[in-house]
Each structure stands twice: as C-alpha cells, then as structure tokens.
Amino acid sequence: MSKNKKQIRQDFRDECLWRDNYSCRGPGCSFKSSSEKAEEDLDVHHIKNRSGLPFGGYIKENGISLCERCHIKAEKSLVGNDQTGDFSVNNLYKIIGSSKEQAIKASLEIKGL
C-alpha cells in the first residue's frame, strides 16, 4: 500500500526529529526538546526549497530540525540565496551529513505519491 502525502510529510518530520535527537541543529544553538513536545517546539526545515526537488523533497536527507529562531534565519538565508553563511544550504546539509545530490537521489526513490 502506498503512502499518501500527509503520511509522507509526517514521516519526514518524525525521521528528522528523531535523527536530530529532538534538538535544534542550527549553528551555535543548544535548544533541546523532548519526543513528546518536539512537534510543538521544533520545525523541520526543508534545506533545499521543496520546489527544487522531485516530489517535494520530503526526505530526511533534505530536512533539519530547527527552533523557531533558527528556522527564521534559515528561511532568510534560503530566500536571500546565501551561499556561504551559517544557515546556507550547503552548511545545513553538512550539519546533517547530507548534500543536494543525496537529497535528489532520495527524493527520486519516493514511491506512491
């Protein structure tokens, strides 16, 4: 049975939050939540814009857990096309041990949308 979009999005959030140990992975941030409160306390940011990846990039290779403050910084960096700052696409990929290429490959493997 294939997954629907809602389930794929939830799996994306759950996988990223778990991988990131329910903590903000923003550079220099030490905010930590709990598995019970992570949905309230943390956002899962698409490192590469969803429109830039096949099937919306709902894969852990393209997501990073961020507190509200860091999420705002990451969004500003993405919109401003910052290639070198702490919240640049390449740096966020590095933090989670991924890359644009890995995210594209994982996105192409999503089935059932």
Image: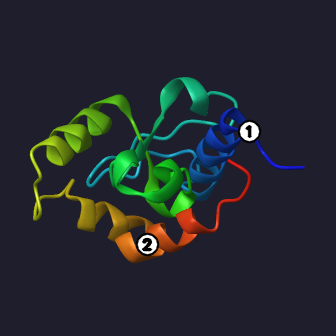
Expressed as whole percent of the image width and height from the top left, the position of residue 69 reads 28, 31
Q: Which one is in front, 109 or 103?
A: 109
58 sits to left or right of 66: right
Looking at the image, is 64 positioned above or below residue 61?
Answer: above
Expressed as whole percent of the image width and height from the top left, the position of residue 36 reads 70, 30
Amino acid type at circle 1 is Asn
Expressed as whole percent of the image width and height from the top left, the position of residue 21 reads 58, 52
Q: Residue at x 82, y 49 (%)?
A: 2
Judge the density around disc 1: few (<14), some (14-19), many (≥20) Cα neighbours within 10 Å: few
Residue occupying the far top of the picture: 40
Q: Which residue is mark 2?
A: 98
Q: Residue at x 62, y 27 (%)?
A: 37
In terms of image quadrants, where is residue 72? top left
Query: Which marked residue is nearer to the observer: mark 1 or mark 2?
Result: 1
Amino acid type at circle 2 is Ser
Q: What colouring does the structure picture have? A: rainbow
Mark positioned earlier in the residue sequence (1 or 2) = 1
Q: Which residue is mark 1?
A: 4
